[in-house]
Amino acid sequence: MTRFLASTITFPYKRSLGPVVGAFMTALTERRILGIRNGETVLVPPMEWDPATGAELEHDFVEVGPAGTVKSWTWVSAPSEQHPLAHPFAFALIQLDGATTPLLHAVDAGSAEAMAEGGRVAPRWRGTRLGRIDDIVCFVPGETPETEGEDTGPAEQPVERMDYLASITYRNPVPDATDRAVEASKDHRLLGLRCPTCQRVYAGGRGYCPIDALELGPDCEVELPHAGTITNYSIVTPVQYPGQTETEPFVRAFVLLDGTDVIVPYAAVIDLPADEVRVGQRVAAVWASPAEEIDEGGGMGGAWGALIGWIPSGEPDVADPDLVNRIF
Amino acid sequence: MAGSKDTGRGGDIAVVGWAQTPMERHTEKSETQLLMDVITDALAPLALTRADIDFTCLGSCDYITGQAFSFVSNLDAIGAWPPKRDSHVEMDGAWALYEAWLRLQEGDIEIAVVTGSGRSSTGDPALIYPMEMDPYFLAPLGADPLTFAALQARAVIAAGIADERSMAEVAVRSRGKGDVDALMAEDYIRQPLRRHDVPPITDGAAAMVLATGDRARRLVERPAYITGFDHRTECHNPSFRALDDSPSTRLAAEAAGLGDGPVEVAELQAAFTHEELLLASVLGLGEGVALNPSGGALRANPIMATGLCRIGYAADHVMGGGHRALAHSTSGPCLQQNLVCIVEDAP
């Protein structure tokens, strides 16, 4: 039975708005909606360019709405966590008074029966507005705008940027070869897979020979040594970003296993300060204690399970000028 | 027409084979494993190996896979040593095919393999696709594909191109099962769409082999020659488009030479029932054209491979004795970008 691992990836984007979208967002904080003139038409939402020709538009803004007419709609009976309202609502194409194109937004209509093409709607403003399209919570039937909660007023400065948090949860299958490598690591074994065609050996749970495009099964397994030589390294100075757990510079080393062609990439080092790491340094594998939590999945450098890093073995360095070239 | 410089025409380039994985709601294989299998399956009947491939182009999407640079691990499936000519598009495999078709026109290589692959079951498409929309006006509202499809369906119905019954008829014909009256009695899931109007979520991959000139003729008895190929795009925000039309499809079809003669089969990437009716109308496909005999995207919708499969089925028609077929692929909300490929029994 294939094992699946769930992981959530979060991207906290900060988006520049530019002169046109920025003006629109700034106006939203003032509870005003802006379109942009494009010849005889008024585009809402405003664009920097003519959508048909790509010609740059003059920054000739036109205040539209706040009420408008429903041109088309659909009923969302089971809203998602990303939708503007937690209860059933309509998504509608709303042509605001004075605009010639429709804006997509939500309508809090109560029921699908209350929606109709030609229906009139007006915005429900958020009390605290940041300069985002969802400063308008949704539209409501009728001609009269509403404000939700206490009005904290317009932005003090023009809005130039917006935050957008993208977060996605994925479930990915863990290949059998990765599972076998992680299991073996719990017994302090370093598992390799030898390609029957080219005889190259792969480690870190990689279950294919990329050269011969062959899947490598349990019959290809070989035991790899627990000692090696640092071929190359990088000292990473952590930049602070959401989710960053490192605070001090740290080493990522590439280790060539003795008597093999196998590189363990991006490996952590233990009891080896960043200013003492060297190409040619001899190292030995360090395994997690049974109580320690280990990474059951793997990342760009492979899946290594209970192999948590490499410690200087005290043997004399290897002097080989070609070593530094080996990172794959 | 070898060496022709007309946009969208030319080159003595043919589809000589293709393969697809089983199309499943939820595969236990990784995307790399799917590609490993399907490339082997496409090459084996032609007695070709990976060493014979001069150029590869893979179509896939990191957003669906959930891994940055996922195409790098997919390279494990092509046997890229010694180093090969390789490319990737963050598009359906149909666009990978377009790039390979252009590359083969250089004339210095003979065999190309293209793939499309995706595991939609990895995430929740209803939550992933809104993040690919306009980041200022649409993504913050969670504007999802079902909403856009419903709004376009309403426009297509208002224009008299479809009605809810003809949409149900498309569903029954595509899936080869169901009863129109029974389907019409179901509740809406996003008015005017019912469950049967909406595609399945599918994991899968496809791989296609292209060959040029005499090499193609030595490989198979009836190569499916690509005689026209073009793709066009429209404005990203559906607010600024006429949703009851698809001018980009019309332009791509004109450039690909659809009007040069009749087609017997049209494989259209219509994930929603109304899209097939709209596309058939825009392309002017009459009674004599078999629409989506494969069952189309309503039967299996392996995102990133759905379009390449359409071209595969069109090629099957020609390789199996037919003369001329059209394949279509699309990308973006409400048929934003459209690709048309014509395959024929002669170059």
Image: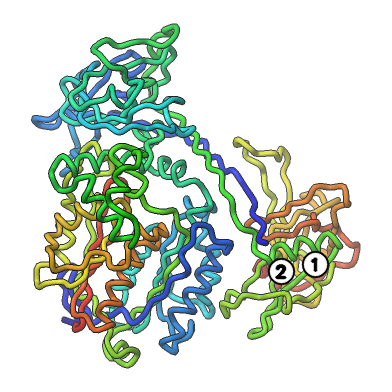
Mark number for residue A203? 2
Where is residue B275 shown, x and y percent of the image?
Answer: 25, 51
Horizontal side, residue B215 vs residue A222: left or right: left
Classify mark 1: residues with Cα within 10 Å, few (<14), some (14-19) or many (20+).
many
Residue A35, horizontal then vertical, whole percent: 22, 25
Of the pair B10 and B165, the residue shown nearer to us: B165
In this rendering, the answer to whether A309 lies above or below B40 is: above
Parent chain of label 2 = A
Q: Is residue B267 visible?
A: yes
Which type of secondary structure does the marked residue at label 2 adopt? strand
Q: Can residue A54 be seen in this view?
A: no
**Dot 1 or dot 2, earlier in sequence:** 1
Q: Identify which amino acid the numbered label 1 is placed on.
A: Leu
Give SS at disc 1: strand
The disc labelled 2 sits on which kind of residue?
A: Ala
Q: Residue A4 carries which label?
A: none
Q: Mark 1 points at which residue?
A: A190
Question: Alpha-carbon neighbours of circle 2 within 10 Å: few (<14), some, or many (≥20)?
Answer: many
- Residue nearer the viewer, A261 or B248: B248
Point out residue B34 in the picture as x, y percentages from the top left corner: 52, 68
In the rendered structure, are the residues bearing label 1 and label 2 in contact, judged by CB atoms less than 8 Å apart? Answer: yes
The quarter of the picture where residue A191 lies is bottom right
Q: In this view, does B216 lie above or below B123?
A: below
> In which quadrant will I find the C terminus of chain B?
bottom left
